[in-house]
Amino acid sequence: MLTRCLFLLTAVLLAPVLALATPLADKVVEHRLGNGLRLLMVERHDTPTVSAYITLGVGSVHESSETRGVAHLLEHMLFKGTTTLGTTDYRAEEPLLLEIEQVGSELDRLRLQPAADPVRVADLEARLKTLQEQHKAFVVKDAFAQLYSESGAVGFNAFTSKDMTTYLVSLPANKLELWALLESDRMKNAVLREFYTERDVVREERRRSYESNPDGLLYETLVSTAFTVHPYRNPIIGWHTDIANLTLAETRDFLRRYYAPVNTTIALVGDFRAAEAVALVERYFGGIAPGEPVPAVAAVEPEQAGEKRVAIEFDAEPQLAIAFHKPTLPDRDDYAFDLIDQVLGQGRTSRLYRRLVEKEQLATAVAVYGAPGSRYPNLFVIEAVPRHPHTSAEVEAAILDELERLKNEPVSATELTRARNRLLTDNLRALRSNSGLARMLTTYQVLAGDWRYLVDYETRIGELTAEDLRATAQRWFTSKNRTAVTLQRKGGAER
């Protein structure tokens, strides 16, 4: 009886997932502009709104040693406006911007010299401060956000990851041309005003989010320890000295080369007609120069030859993070890891939560996730917070015991079905909203090279067996493939 109920429940849960995914391939309309920009469209006429995602296939992984942190800084800078937005008078502002850049560049150059004249440095700092004060008279704050808000738009935002950068907004359908006007203007005519001020803002963000934050410090240390060659080891925000030494010239060059149509995918989902949207995008974006294709990352992380282990001293409650290198999509093992993630760490019925938090009460929290990117081979991460008086060593032993169990015992049919259903249901929730579908279309177009990864996903997940999960665990959950980082109080005390 229980088996039959489980079968019926599975059918009920999977039906809407398959019903939505099956016609998706037929509903997505594609268009490629002459300059290389890719447009993906799905018409949905339920509500008079449109979600618009612009995703550029450029992220922190594409930075050089001279430009680390530039992609994240540009995310900030591209909200500053253009030659027509964000300024009271660009013709009058432009000479002042040039003078600010000259003084700021000279100051940056001098600061790198070990024997720089302190009087000259102080003079330049004072001059830069005066120029920045004068520049405030020309700055119109949050011009993009204000225009969108006045037009009824919501969710205007951006995010930068290792692999890509995305700008998004949802707005009334009759304001789609406003979106095309604003975003094409931003792509063509961005002005990097308030550069030195914003660079200081990002430095403070780094101090707050990583250097003085135990969670950020643990994560950053884990990733930079696990990777030795691949640029995934570098934080998206950049290291402190990276941010401090980014120049306006380097930032502008990165923008002009890569934030361009040839690296751009736009997804529109909502209440519009595809033919009209194509004409609109062609009119506003078609004349923009293609730019340069983002070069592929040549660095390949060598196979790890032994466990890496780091202990951080920090005045906070103890924490533990364990990572294993793994392949990325569309490798079959990557699909298996999606299910392993569900079995081990997602929800109150997951193995690690039930054992560490509920049964043995070794930890107050446990989390499982993939990091730090998805375009290149990445990491499977398990984090936990020990519950006093238990130690990180006790928690780690329990986690490794569960991984051995996964390697030696196939998961039950019930557990596998539950993991598969939860995974597909989560995807369904994302696909149902205009914003969620737009995000997934651009994300997988960039990461997998084809948005149709979404269409095939249920099939690939459905093909995996308990033996596949066991084989994947055996391949990757090995001691030599492991990186472990603990955060503890000074002197090694866990309280």
Image: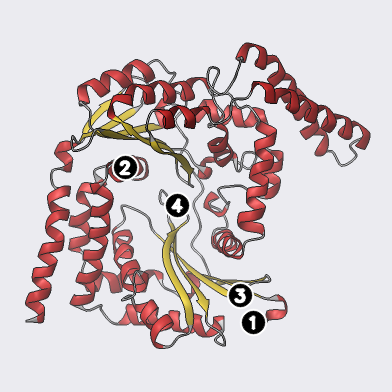
**Of residues 308 and 134, the one drawn nearer to the viewer in this rendering:** 134
> Mark 4 sits on what residue?
373
**Which sits earlier in the primary sequence, circle 3 or circle 2?**
3
**Identity of the residue drawn at 67% across and 44% down:** 242
For the residue marked with disc 2, what is the amino acid?
A: Ser
Residue drawn at point x = 63 percent, y = 81 percent = 494
Q: Amino acid at mark 3?
A: Glu
* Mark toward the start of the polypeptide (2 vs 1): 2
**Crowding near the residue tagged with mark 1, few <14, some 14–19, many ≥20 C-alpha atoms within 10 Å:** few
Residue on which the image places disc 1: 495
- On the question of residue 355 being in view, the answer is yes
**Residue 258's spot in the image, x, y percent?**
49, 30
Can you tell which mark lies on residue 317? Answer: 3
Q: Provide the residue designation for mark 2.
A: 435
Q: Mark 3 and mark 1 in contact (Cβ < 8 Å)?
A: no
Q: Quadrant of the C terminus?
A: bottom right
Q: Nearer the viewer, mark 4 or mark 1?
A: 1
